[in-house]
Image: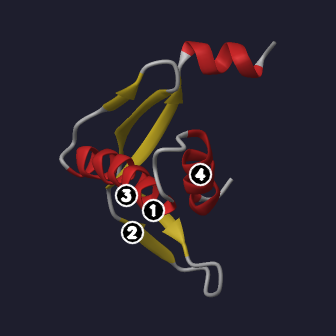
Amino acid sequence: MTKAQIIERVSEQVTTLTKRQAEVVVNTIFDCVRDSLKNGDKTEIRGFGSFRLRARRMKEGRNPKTGATVAVPAKRVPFFKAGKELKELLNQ
């Protein structure tokens, strides 16, 4: 499902919202999750799951073309953990 399909579904289910208003709602939710992760905070949506950051250590990688070793710097990556209700729904 794409972002455009989510916006379409929201505008269909909430008939008082126009498509443009539904787009603002969806974008606001995504922006809040993005800003939360950027600040190092966790975002939890009950019944769906939680978004958080995980730290990856620096490691040695390999350039596939030359075979030379390359240092891959440490970084933070987003991680999603599904909530209990979502897991139960998927495993019925």
- Tell me, yes or no, whether the two marked residues, 1 and 3, touch with CB atoms within 8 Å: no
- Tell me, yes or no, whether the two marked residues, 3 and 2, touch with CB atoms within 8 Å: no
Q: Which mark is residue 24?
A: 3
User: Which of the two marks, 1 or 4, is nearer to us in this view?
Assistant: 4
| CA distance for labels 1 and 2 | 5 Å
Label 3: how many residues lie within 10 Å, few (<14), some (14-19) or many (20+)? Answer: few
Q: Which residue is mark 4?
A: 6
Q: Which mark is residue 8?
A: none
Lower sequence index among marks 3 and 2: 3
- Tell me, yes or no, whether the two marked residues, 2 and 4, touch with CB atoms within 8 Å: no
- Work out which quarter of the rendered image holds the C terminus and state it: top right
Does residue 13 lie above or below 71 as drawn? above
- Tell me, yes or no, whether the two marked residues, 1 and 4, touch with CB atoms within 8 Å: no
| CA distance for labels 3 and 2 | 41 Å
At a point 46% along the width and 53% down the height, the residue shown is 22
Label 2: how many residues lie within 10 Å, few (<14), some (14-19) or many (20+)? Answer: few
Lower sequence index among marks 1 and 3: 3
